[in-house]
């Protein structure tokens, strides 16, 4: 068994279907831990969910006799389903996300025509909504929430004992930044958010949520504020807002809709819970149809 007695231990888990990194952050002194962005396995064609990825994290927690005190989401993801609710069922730990989730819930409540009884869009399904700059504890480790909207309205970064978890605000330097063309996305806002992160010390380690291995290079999940400021292909220390917005907007025009956006968003705005079962006991994912005018009567 790995010893987790040092002051802080960060264990990375990788979901290869969605290229997502999840992290378990452990306070060695108290054996308390937080999980960031856990993934629920999902076979879209079969509509089948499964929990191998989350179970591997739970097994690690059990093996090392850790106490999970937070399930942290960096934002409502559009590319994978969150295992937050499943992990909460297994551990009792609270699920937290940035308070911008209310806006994201409202946006998608309209898009998916979700009834008030199922979603009020006031942060329901989450146990705690973080305000900007809010502090929280993982045992003796102090965490700070930095609001970093732009990719989505609810995006936050977590700075935990000097280690920065940025969600999708930044990718590795050779991949740049995440798209800003989802409902509520805003490239100018993402630029401002990145400036906040770039004010942290250059040596600050920065952990990615995704890596798509550009040009076939090896998988990477760790960089630093300084490395990003020098090398990020979209935003370096001296990049201006207009420059970035133009580059980001042009790139977004070329991107396809993420394969799992409809199932992912419907589950993730509910903190990883599936939509309510219908009268036959089955839960369904909706897909809004577009360009339907020519098929309508009258
Ligand atoms: Fe995302």
Image: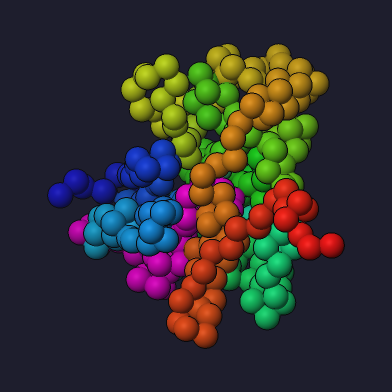
Between 131 and 56, the one nearer to me in the picture: 56
Classify the position of the C terminus by image quarter: bottom right
Q: Is residue 232 above or below residue 179?
A: above
Task: Give yes or no for residue 242 being in the magenta stretch.
Answer: no
Task: Give yes or no for residue 89 being in the magenta stretch.
Answer: yes
Picture residue at 48% right of the left edge, 43% below the top:
161
| Residue at far bottom of view | 279
State the image coordinates of residue 57 (x, y, percent, origin top left). Answer: 31, 55
- Residue 180 in the figure: left or right of residue 12: right
Picture residue at 71% right of the left edge, 59% below the top:
111
- Residue 97 in the figure: left or right of residue 277: right
Colour convention of the picture: rainbow
Q: Is residue 244 above or below residue 170?
A: above
Give the image quarter of residue 188. Answer: top right
| Residue at far right of view | 298
Give the image quarter of residue 254. Answer: top right
Tally of marks: 0
Picture residue at 46% right of the left edge, 62% below the top:
84
| Residue at far front of view | 298
| Magenta segment boundaries in residue numbering | 63-92
Picture residue at 42% right of the left edge, 61% below the top:
47
State the image coordinates of residue 118 (x, y, percent, origin top left). Answer: 64, 76
Q: Report if residue 82 is visible in the image.
A: yes
Q: Is residue 281 above or below residue 36?
A: below
State the image coordinates of residue 16 (x, y, percent, origin top left). Answer: 35, 40
Between 266 and 297, the one nearer to me in the picture: 297
Between 269 and 231, the one nearer to me in the picture: 269
Between 126 and 11, the one nearer to me in the picture: 126
**Within the displayed image, which quadrant is ligand 1 positioned in?**
top right
Q: Report if residue 97 is visible in the image.
A: no
């Amino acid at each position: 068994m790995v010893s987790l007695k040092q002051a802080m231990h960060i264990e990375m888990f990788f979901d290869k279907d969605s290229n997502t990194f999840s992290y378990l952050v452990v306070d060695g002194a108290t054996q308390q831990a937080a999980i960031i962005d856990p993934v629920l396995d999902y076979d879209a064609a079969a509509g089948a969910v499964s929990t191998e990825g989350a179970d591997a994290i739970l097994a690690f927690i059990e093996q090392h006799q850790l106490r999970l005190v937070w399930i942290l989401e960096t934002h409502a993801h559009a590319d994978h389903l969150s295992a937050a609710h499943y992990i909460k069922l297994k551990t009792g730990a609270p699920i937290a996300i940035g308070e911008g989730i209310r806006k994201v819930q409202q946006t998608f409540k309209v898009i998916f025509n979700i009834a008030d009884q199922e979603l009020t869009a006031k942060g329901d399904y989450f146990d705690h909504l973080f305000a900007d700059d809010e502090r929280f504890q993982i045992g003796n480790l102090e965490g700070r929430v930095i609001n970093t909207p732009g990719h989505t309205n609810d995006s936050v970064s977590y700075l935990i004992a000097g280690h920065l978890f940025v969600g999708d605000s930044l990718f590795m330097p050779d991949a740049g930044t995440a798209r800003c063309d989802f409902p509520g996305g805003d490239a100018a806002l993402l630029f401002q958010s990145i400036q906040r992160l770039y004010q942290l010390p250059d040596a600050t380690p920065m952990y990615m949520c995704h890596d798509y291995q550009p040009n076939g290079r090896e998988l990477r999940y760790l960089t630093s504020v300084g490395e990003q400021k020098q090398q990020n292909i979209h935003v370096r220390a001296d990049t201006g807002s207009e420059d970035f917005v133009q580059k980001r907007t042009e790139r977004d025009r070329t991107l396809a809709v993420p394969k799992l956006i409809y199932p992912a968003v419907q589950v993730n705005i509910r903190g990883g819970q599936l939509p309510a079962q219908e009268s036959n006991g089955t839960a369904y994912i909706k897909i809004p149809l577009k360009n339907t005018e020519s098929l309508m009567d009258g």
